[in-house]
Image (cartoon, grey):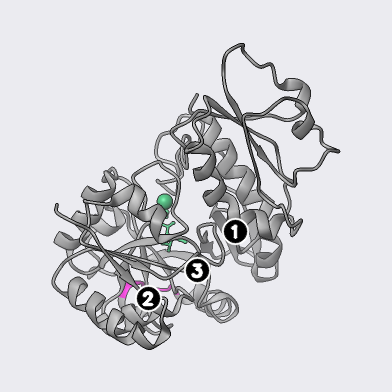
Amino acid sequence: MSETRIIDASDPAAQNKVVLDVVALLAAGEVVALPTETVYGLGADALNPEAVAKVFAAKERPAFDPLIVHVGSFEQVDEVAEVPEELKEVVAKLMKAHWPGPLTLVLPKKDCVPDIVTSGLPTVAVRMSAHPIMKAVVRGLGHPVAAPSANRFGRISPTSASAVEKELSGRIPAIVDGGACREGLESTIIRPEAGEKRPVLHMLRSGPVTKEMLQRFGKVERPKRNRSNEAPEAPGQLDSHYAPVTPLRLLRKPEDFKPEAGKKYGLLSYCGSEKTGFINAYEWDHVEELSPGNGKLAEAAVRFFFVLRLLDESGVDEIIAEPVSETGLGVAIMDKLRRASSRK
Ligand code: TXA
Ligand code: MG
């Protein structure tokens, strides 16, 4: 692949033209990196298997890991998914409350969705992005857009166009620069199922739509963690995901840190708080704070992948991560920290 074009979409007046250009590329079977409110996605026409194959190739993504399909309207869900009668009410309520937004629904798929998109699963993951560019592109194309996060497989998700460039430059024809992502963490993924009294919402990936926010729609269940690493229900949710190149270790308390002589250590601090002790536990070679303004979890979520990337590029030998409070958005952050640290 030759050069990757960066398409600047910061000027609202130019956005129509940008959307037209991107739609033309996608309609021609190309892939384009696009901003969404969560993270940047690598988009392709979801109904064109050759185009979708280019997404897998650019990301070096294994074929067993299915893609999320982005729709442009509630009605478009029915083009790709067969919502069972008994789930129609809860699905409608979830869409009304959280779409467009960072919630992905896993539903039985229709035949028009190529197997490569769903990795042969009988279900399809669907979401409607709130980002104006992604929304306009899906509408302009007239087909749903398959878009996984625009990083190489297993690596840190990109929350800016420059992060996408570092991951995929030279592998894809274009990246749309729509600025930094508002949410910073990937969408929450749930699989709704009919229950005896209330629907059951299987939470396959934690994200910006938290368990607390979903409880009014049904019983929220976290699938048992799959220890064997074989065929987890969300196949992309393997251990050793979201990993920086630099080894990362999540520690519970400062006393657990035993530095080795001659090694450089970076600290991924939650609020830079002296109370938890990590910040003063060592002469860190590099420190990044998730929530320097003390917006706490919301701020930490937006900055998470950005900060992880800074630490990865800082030249330290190991990143030490301190825990964040495991409530609300903190559940998704801790999940990602555990996966990032499980590889070593
Ligand atoms: O916020 C997001 O969801 C971003 C933006 C770009 O929309 N996309 C994203 O895609 O995070 P990706 O490919 O990085 O993660 C998709 C996850 C994977 O863990 C995959 O296994 C799961 O969705 N998934 C896709 N289809 C599925 C299905 N039919 N059943 C269960 N899990 C599925
Ligand atoms: Mg991803």
Is 320 situated left or right of 178 in this image? right
Residue at 47%, 42% (x, y): give it.
242
Camera-nearest residue between 344 and 265? 265
Residue 105 in the image, given as x and y percentages of width and height? 47, 66
Residue 302 badge: 1
Q: Give, as a three-letter code, the residue at label 2.
A: Ala
- Mark 2 residue CB less than 8 A from any atom of ligand 1: no
The Cα atoms of the two marked residues, 2 and 1, are separated by 20 Å
Of tags 2 and 3, which is closer to the observer?
2
Is 174 magenta? The answer is no
Q: Which residue is mark 3?
A: 37
Q: Which residues are magenta?
A: 80-84
Residue 87 in the image, given as x and y percentages of width and height? 51, 73
Q: Which residue is mark 2?
A: 9
What element does badge 2 sit on?
Answer: loop
Residue at 58%, 61% (x, y): give it.
201
**View quadrant of ligand 1:** bottom left
Camera-nearest residue between 323 and 313? 313
